[in-house]
Image (cartoon, helix red, strand yellow):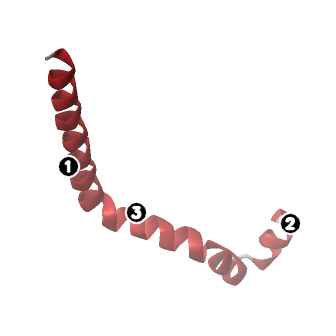
Amino acid sequence: MEAKKFSRSTKINVATHISVANIYVRRYNFSIGLVILYFSNRRYIVQRLMPKRRAVLD
């Protein structure tokens, strides 16, 4: 009896966490995409705008 109750509450817990994660991802997907774009293009941007500074950093 106790094990059944525990497993059911665990399943509910996992489902709640998954739904919360889905909401979080949907809400912040755009900003995360922007951050990923910025970091993937940062080397190109730095090369374009500040070649001397990049030489010092590398």
**Is residue 34 depicted above or below 16 in this figure?**
below
First in residue order: circle 1 vs circle 3: 1
Locate residue 14 relative to residue 58 in the image: left or right. left
- Residue 57: x, y in percent? 82, 63
Toward which corner of the image does residue 53 lie, by quadrant?
A: bottom right
- Label 1 sits on a secondary structure element that is helix
- Which is closer to the viewer, label 1 or label 2? 1
* Residue type, mark 1 in image: Ser
Locate residue 19 relative to residue 29 in the image: left or right. left
Q: Residue at x 32, y 67 (%)?
A: 30
**Is residue 39 depicted above or below 16 in this figure?**
below
Look at mark 3 in the image and give the residue it sits on.
32
First in residue order: circle 1 vs circle 2: 1
First in residue order: circle 3 vs circle 2: 3
Look at mark 2 in the image and give the residue it sits on.
56
Looking at the figure, which quarter contains the C terminus?
bottom right
Which of the two residues, 20 or 27, is positioned nearer the viewer here? Answer: 20
Q: Which residue is drawn at 49% across and 68% down?
A: 36
* Residue type, mark 2 in image: Val
- Residue 13: x, y in percent? 21, 34
- Label 2 sits on a secondary structure element that is helix
* Residue type, mark 3 in image: Ile
Toward which corner of the image does residue 7 lie, by quadrant?
A: top left
Which of the two residues, 45 or 29, is positioned nearer the viewer here? Answer: 29
Look at mark 1 in the image and give the residue it sits on.
19
The residue lying furthest to the top in this view is 2
- Which is closer to the viewer, label 1 or label 3? 1
Could you give the CA–CA distance between mark 1 and mark 3, rounded to whole angstroms? 19 Å
Within 10 angstroms of label 1, few (less than 14), some, or many (20 or more) residues? few
